[in-house]
Image (tube, coloured by chain):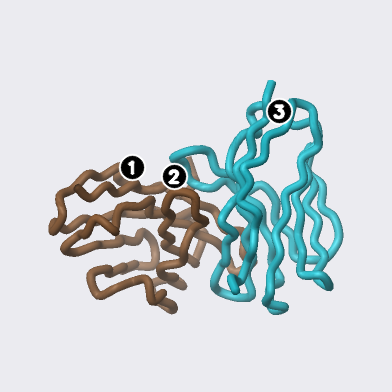
């Protein structure tokens, strides 16, 4: 079993839709959680960082962590074509970061 | 620009040749990581430095791979006797102890 499981998609939504991206994990020692956006042939860009259960909002993005269920989500409101990218979840227990495989998102104008 | 920078952005080499990638982390970051990413996969951990000390190495890092961070600032990743299976994006990232990890744009390796 992988440390981090992420639905690879692909996910295709119309512009303006609400997008929900999800990851599950197995290691209860994970305490820091991140979401990255990665455009083709570019390095991952940090979108959201949180270390506690609950919601964290930044503009159109909301990160949600449920440590009891070992489940994290990223919500994108009013999705835009420029949001089309691969979204990676990541988490760490200490020194090492563990990544999901990424979900490919396409927002159709 | 105070982000993580990597050089070169793209390297094409023939099988059996040696290649070296350089990473300059964000200046106040003491942690530096190397990851490898292939198409459709998330980044895979290769190695981690705390200042100049290499504290962790993945089993993915065979004897042909070596990484250094001699003065606790920039780092190099060398691959000797490259194989076609080494073709991938090599990502460098840096962070402080609080864990926000910032990536460079990556160095893409193509082994012919």
Q: Nearer the viewer, residue A19 or A41?
A: A19
Give residue B48's position: percent from left, percent from top: 44, 70
Query: The residue tagged with tag 3: helix, strand or loop?
Result: loop
Foreground mark, 3 or 1, reads 3
Are callouts 1 and 2 both on one chain?
A: yes
The chain that hosts pointer 3 is A
Which residue is located at x 67 percent, y 30 percent?
A: A107
Q: Which residue is mark 1?
A: B9
- How far apart, in angstroms, are the residues tagged by discs 1 and 2? 7 Å
Which residue is located at x 74 percent, y 27 percent?
A: A14
* Residue B99, quarter of the rendered image: bottom right
Label 2 neighbour load within 10 Å: few <14, some 14-19, many 20+ = many
The chain that hosts pointer 2 is B
Give residue B86's position: percent from left, percent from top: 29, 58
The circle drawn on residue A80 is 3
**Left-right relation of B9 to A92:** left
Foreground mark, 3 or 2, reads 3
């Amino acid at each position: 079993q992988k440390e981090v499981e992420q639905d690879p998609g692909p996910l295709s939504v119309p512009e303006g839709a609400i997008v929900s991206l999800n990851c599950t994990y197995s290691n209860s020692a994970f305490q820091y959680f991140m979401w990255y956006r990665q455009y083709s042939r570019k390095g991952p860009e940090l979108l959201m960082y949180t270390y506690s259960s609950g919601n964290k909002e930044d503009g159109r993005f909301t990160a949600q962590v449920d440590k009891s269920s070992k489940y994290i989500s990223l919500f994108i409101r009013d999705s835009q074509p420029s949001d089309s990218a691969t979204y990676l979840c990541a988490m760490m227990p200490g020194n090492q970061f563990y990544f999901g495989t990424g979900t490919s998102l396409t927002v159709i104008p | 620009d105070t982000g993580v920078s990597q050089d070169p952005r793209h390297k094409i080499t023939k099988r059996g040749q040696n290649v070296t990638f350089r990473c300059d982390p964000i200046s106040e970051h003491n942690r530096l990581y190397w990851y490898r990413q292939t198409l459709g996969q998330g980044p895979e951990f290769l190695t981690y430095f705390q200042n100049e000390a290499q504290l962790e190495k993945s089993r993915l890092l065979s004897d042909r791979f070596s990484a250094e961070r001699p003065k606790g600032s920039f780092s190099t990743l060398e691959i000797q006797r490259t194989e076609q299976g080494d073709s991938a994006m090599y990502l460098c990232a840096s962070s402080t102890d609080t864990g926000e990890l910032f990536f460079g744009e990556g160095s893409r390796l193509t082994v012919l």
